[in-house]
Image (cartoon, rainbow, N blue to C red):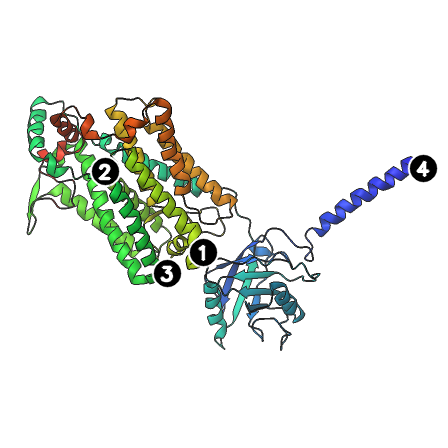
Amino acid sequence: MAASHWAYTILFFFSSLSLAASNSSSPFICRTTPQQVIIKIWVNGIEGKNIEGLGALFGGILPIHEKEGIRLPAVIPQPVECCSNLSSKLSGSIAICQRGDCDFSTKAEVAQSGGASGMLVIDNEGDGLPVMDCPHTKTLNISIPSVVVTKSDGEVLSKALACEKSSVELLLYAPLRPVLDMSVLFLWFMAVGTVTCASVWKGLIVCDKSEGSYSQLLRKESLETDEDDEEIVEINMMSAVVFVITASAFLLLLYYFMSSWFVWLLIVLFCIGGIQGIHSCVISLLLSKWRNLGKRKVNIPLFGSVSIFSLVVFVSCFVFTVFWAAYRKASYSWIGQDILGIFLIITVLQLAQLPNIKVATVLLCCAFLYDIFWVFLSPEIFGNSVMIAVAEGDNSGGESIPMLLRVPRFFDPFGGYNMIGFGDLVFPGLLVAFSLRYDKQKKKGLANGYFLWLTVGYGLGLLFTYLALYLMNGQGQPALLYLVPCTLGTFVMLGLVRGELKDLWNYSLEDHSPSTSSSRQSFTDRVDCASETNNIEVRGPLSV
């Protein structure tokens, strides 16, 4: 009897488990995670642009694959809020309901009682999507799937339905997103590679001056012209604070007055900077290896004698940039945008330099607070996250700000891009470049220097950023929140452990240079060895 009793107990236990498992997918059970939904649209049989939505925690579960979904007509019910009994039947259709005042579960019950096979709610807020949660005060008996879409996507759908002669059909499905898209790794390598390349760029364009006569001539010319050629902007504490204040004012300007013409102005400035960046980098790199490229010249009105090589490079850069601007909305335009952006960042990091850790601390801490405030704290004041709203291009007429590197999500069925702003490369990049200059001046190796560890710290900071994005379900993250501690914190801790923090804090390149002539010679070795001999300026597209 005892054995029989235990057998029945075990059988009842496993039966309960199987019943619970079967009921876990029941539409009457509240789920804990909403489905991310793709909505395919057909207007008069012509397929339009897909929109995205967020599934409810109650009701039916949408299929994972598109082929398993059912194409159904969309209908605007009366009343449009779906908060009370409908005046007409919606048999076999998807009810398009406005947000209204009642809760989501009430809308779903009304739509289901009217015969609808699904419900799509148009939100009335401009930022983000609400979670359609289960009410705790009543038992639900909802079997139809429910989805909420943003106000902007809903307006497009409502306009199509407003036409009497138009027929709108929808297909809803919820594909699974990959845990890690390869575009994240690609963007990580791109960002770390750009910062590293910009830091070591001057070492890449060093000339081979094995010929004695050439070296003597170059040294003589350098002493006369290096002050005009080396246009280095050394950042000080005041300019660091002013820069962050100016950036905040410009961000607010974009937020309140964002329009297509404003974004077009930024696109034009980006193109000018991209042309300058590519031209400068290509000229300096190629002339450092092949000095004879710049000897042949041609006379151009208003510009005088110009190197044919410099002119050809400039025209090529101009054509490339115009092509990108003309096709900036094409699926492949991200390649051109990234190329222009990378060369622009490299050029900026050659022109701007940090003198010591004291200035770096002020600049990066201000940028740290700037990033956190405009992403996380600005919604408390302005109602929306100002940084995210500007980055997403709200009210920009379909245009997007180009001051970022982006890579499409190749394996994500929802598409989109992984992006990183220029500031997330430039601010830490200034510190990484300074660490390399300090290591060279102090004749430090990789292991006992700072450059290697700051590069590793920058890479780890980016990894933490992407990890936070994943853990917070794609909510926008201020990258400098993770990059500043991983770079500046690493620098300060290493300096403290090695007893060099005081020197780093008050460091100045002029104070540590052996002589003025050696400093000038160092600059000549880096950049001007080719341009001085061939009378070519690497700073501008056309040089006289």
**For residue 400, above or below residue 504:** below
Q: Position of residue 203 (x, y in %)?
A: 23, 30
Closer to the eye: label 3 or 1 = 1
Q: Is residue 420 visible?
A: no
Q: Amino acid under label 4?
A: Met
Q: Earlier in the sequence, mark 2 or mark 1?
A: 2
Q: Earlier in the sequence, mark 4 or mark 1?
A: 4
The local secondary structure at tag 1 comes to helix
**For residue 308, above or below residue 226:** below
| Residue on which the image places disc 2 | 350
**Cβ–Cβ below 8 Å for labels 2 and 1?**
no
| Residue on which the image places disc 4 | 1
Q: Position of residue 76 (x, y in %)?
A: 55, 72
**Cβ–Cβ below 8 Å for labels 3 and 4?**
no
Alpha carbon separation for disc pair 4 and 1: 68 Å
Alpha carbon separation for disc pair 3 and 1: 27 Å
Q: Quadrant of residue 138?
A: bottom right
Q: Amino acid under label 3?
A: Gly
Q: Quadrant of residue 386?
A: bottom left
For label 2, the crowd category at 10 Å Cα-Cα, with few meaning under 14, some 14 to 19 and many 20 or more, is: many
Q: Position of residue 460 (x, y in %)?
A: 42, 34
| Residue on which the image places disc 3 | 398
Q: Earlier in the sequence, mark 4 or mark 2?
A: 4
Give the left or right position of residue 395, taking residue 114 as reference: left
**Cβ–Cβ below 8 Å for labels 3 and 2?**
no
Residue at image position (28%, 55%) is: 266
**Cβ–Cβ below 8 Å for labels 4 and 1?**
no
Q: Position of residue 522 (x, y in %)?
A: 16, 28
